[in-house]
Image (spheres, rainbow, N blue to C red):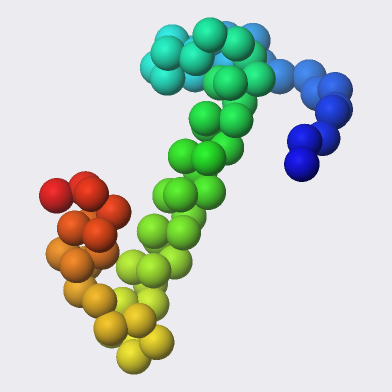
Amino acid sequence: MTKRLSVALDEALLKEVQKLTGARTKKEAIETALRAYVREKRVENLIRLAGSGIVDWTLKDLKTYRGLE
């Protein structure tokens, strides 16, 4: 599902995101940045749960699973 909306964005920030991600369009840059943010927050939440008994993974397990090591 997609949602059409109009927002005012910092043009320099948007251009930097496009440059860093290699996105060809503003839409692609914004979606890439949003996906990266969601992924980062999910990883942070899993790390926070490490050792709680809810998630029985070590930080190394998590990084291996996510392909970070």
25 relative to 52 in the view: left or right: right
Q: Residue furthest front?
A: 1
Residue nearest the observer in this picture, 8 or 29 = 29
Q: Residue 42, position in %: x, y?
A: 46, 59
45 relative to 55 in the view: left or right: right
Q: Residue 26, position in %: x, y?
A: 63, 14
66 relative to 11 in the view: left or right: left
Above or below — where is 8 with respect to 33? Answer: above
Numbered-mark total: 0
Q: Residue furthest right?
A: 5
Above or below — where is 61 with respect to 64? Answer: below
Above or below — where is 4 with respect to 60? Answer: above
Residue found at x 38% / y 77%: 49
Q: Residue 12, position in %: x, y?
A: 57, 9
Q: In the picture, which quadrant includes the N terminus?
A: top right
Residue found at x 60% / y 11%: 25
Residue found at x 43% / y 49%: 40
Residue nearest the observer in this picture, 59 or 3 = 3
Above or below — where is 47 with respect to 1? Answer: below
Q: Residue 33, position in %: x, y?
A: 53, 31
The image quadrant that residue 65 belongs to is bottom left
Q: Residue furthest bottom?
A: 53
